[in-house]
Image: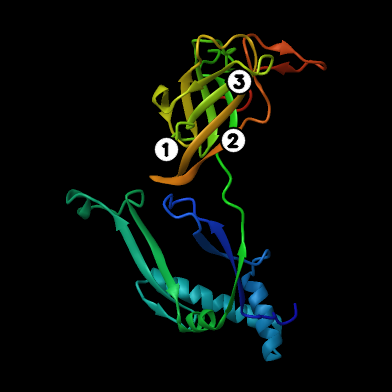
Amino acid sequence: MAQLKYDLDLNLKAYPNELTPDVADDYTVKVHTQSTPLTQDDIAASVAERLGDEPTRVQSIIKVFMEEVALAVASGYNISTDAFYARPMASGVVTEDELATAVDRDKVRVYASFRQGPAVEDALSKAKLHYFLQPAATGPHIAGMTSAFADATTRVPLPMAGGDMAVLTGSGLKLVGDDPAVGITLTSVSDPDTSFFIPPSKVAPNTPKKLQFTLPAGVTEGQWTVQVTTQYSSGSNLTKEPRTFSLPHPITVGETTEEPGGGSQGGSGETPLG
């Protein structure tokens, strides 16, 4: 591998800030990293080219250096280099009685803390920074919807029916926010004028990965589209505007029907019972 070429250019991705509802034109910024990460061997080969040395010798020296750092930290030493600072750390809570016993690694975690050294800080201060716009984050994602009940033997979800419990699984699904659109909407495929809205107050559990609710009694047998709208972002943060995701394929309420080729059509997605 030839010596790596560093242009000290950092591209910064600017995303519309979804967490400040009172500001319409602000952005959050993240570094756009190179598509291919560098390994220890990549760095060693570049250093060898830079010094006119044998790559295998440089790789061996760097490997020994890294091992030395690891052993030193594991022996309680703080490490100070041009590239980084490292120090051993521990966290956990134990009782007084446990102080007289062997350390339980399930209760006590030991690890290393790293921060940038002066060489990295200097290089970053010299980097040329460039903005480029990225679209806003996508909305919630629905993996599937099934009955909350499953066959005791096969654990296959039972057919869904109006008045029974159903489960939506996915990510970013938690129903939160003041917008009246926040909730679950079911729309009949055969009669698009027929739809039912399930508000957050009727959903429990209501988590980012799971929404459980009772199908309205008026949901008849047939195919229905599923839509989730929420202002959930992460933790207690809310997006400025509600975001919506629709399940790509309709779900089937009622007994499943055989499809050509022996397949079946029914609830879409993951089994809620695992």
Quarter of the view holding residue 30: bottom right
Whether label 2 touches label 3, CB < 8 Å: no
Earlier sequence position, callout 3 versus callout 1: 1
Quadrant of the drawing holding the N terminus:
bottom right
**Direction left: furthest residue:** 96
Q: CA distance from mark 1 to mark 2?
A: 16 Å
Residue underneath mark 1? 177
Q: Is residue 70 above or below residue 208?
A: below
- On residue 23, which mark appears? none
- Decide if residue 174 is on the left or right side of residue 133: left
Residue 120 visible in the snapshot = yes
Return the residue at label 3: 187
Q: Residues within 10 Å of mark 2 (few under 14, many from 20)?
A: some
Q: Position of residue 238 (x, y in %)?
A: 43, 45
What amino acid is labelled 1 in the image? Gly
Give the percent coordinates (x, y) of residue 141: 58, 37
Q: Which residue position holds label 2?
A: 245
Name the residue nearer the viewer: 42 or 179: 179
- Residue 56 visible: no
The one nearer the camera, 157 or 242, is 242
The residue that appears at 52% across and 63% down in the rendered structure is 29
Residue type at the position of mark 2: Phe
Q: Of circles 2 and 3, which is in front?
A: 3
